[in-house]
Amino acid sequence: MTKAELRLLVENNRHAIRLTDDLQAPLNPLRGPAFLRTYKRQCDRMQDFIREADAARHQLESAVNATGQILSDAAFRALLQAHDIGTLPWILTQGSLSGGPNSRSQEKQGPFSFAAEPQLVGGVCLEALDLLNDFGAPLKIFPLLREVVPSRQVEIVRLMIALDRVQFRVVRVLIALTPRPQLTDPFARRKQYEGISPLQLAAMETDLAKISHEYLSVASTHGATVLNLITVTSYFDRLLNNPKLVLFLARNLVEHLEVFQKLLDFRESRFQKRAPTA
């Protein structure tokens, strides 16, 4: 990126413009109890979402597997065609989600990395600034972001956006639990918090890294899972509202009928909740 291009990007970024000032991080510490509350709240939010996303994926996977099995029944295929519902949603024709575009094996994402030297504005990665451009981020978070390397800045911003928590307190916790190799100064003295031992902090750092990685991984594909579920449940609405098809399933493929009914019951749960932006 040329200097002219960088200048143009900075001029069009609501936060980058303000980073020309010599911003200093607030000196008031985040006390131990508040630190623990913030940490627990964010971990709970991530774990709740992971559970919900896994439940949604399980429902979709069960429906796809069951459909793949019953399509081998020529009589059932003929019945579908006769009742003009022989055209299935694409996802139902796959037989299995394994290895498909929604495969959890493909959700595994490594640490964020840059193809070239990251562009910095006032010590903050331009990629992080771009992600925050549509959010009213508190100005005081930027001096804190300078304490970590650009890839960690982007990861922290992605987490805050996905959690819908672009907040100073959240940044403080995420910075404090950043592994040393991801600090701008790996030898800097780590902050201590009242009532939290160094061993506890180390354990929290490990747990947060694991949960965060899984959360961002799940969030990156959950939107596609929900869209597929909406399509699939609409199809099974039509199928299970047809008495002849239901009677055929009840007599010959009752286990599969139960899978489809559970899917429709699941629709009343929270799988249509807004997916995080990873």
Image (cartoon, rainbow, N blue to C red):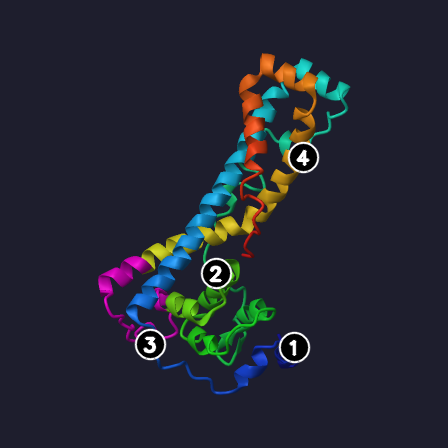
What's the mark number on residue 12?
1
Q: Measure how far apart labels 3 and 1 are at the Cα level.
A: 33 Å
**Left or right of 171 in this view: 101:** right
Sequence-wise first label, 4 or 3: 3
Q: Type of residue at label 1? A: Asn
Tell me, yes or no, whether the two marked residues, 2 and 4, touch with CB atoms within 8 Å: no
Q: How busy is the neighbourhood of tag 1: few (under 14 within 10 Å), some, or many (20 plus)?
A: few
Sequence-wise first label, 2 or 1: 1
Mark 1 residue element: loop
What residue span does the magenta drawing correspond to? Answer: 176-204
User: Where's residue 92, x and y in %?
Assistant: 63, 31
Mark 4 residue element: helix
The question of residue 106 being in magenta is answered with no
State the quadrant of the C terminus.
Answer: bottom right
Q: Measure how far apart labels 2 and 1 are at the Cα level.
A: 24 Å
- Which residue is drawn at the image coordinates 52% and 58% (left, top)? 162
Comparing labels 2 and 4, the label whose residue is closer to the camera: 4
**Left or right of 91 in this view: 115:** left
What's the mark number on residue 234?
4
The residue indicated by pointer 3 is: 29
The correct choice, above or below, for 93 with respect to 40 in the image is above
Q: How busy is the neighbourhood of tag 3: few (under 14 within 10 Å), some, or many (20 plus)?
A: few
Q: Measure how far apart labels 2 and 4 are at the Cα level.
A: 32 Å
- Which residue is drawn at the image coordinates 54% and 37% (left, top)? 99
Sequence-wise first label, 2 or 3: 3
What's the mark number on residue 159?
2
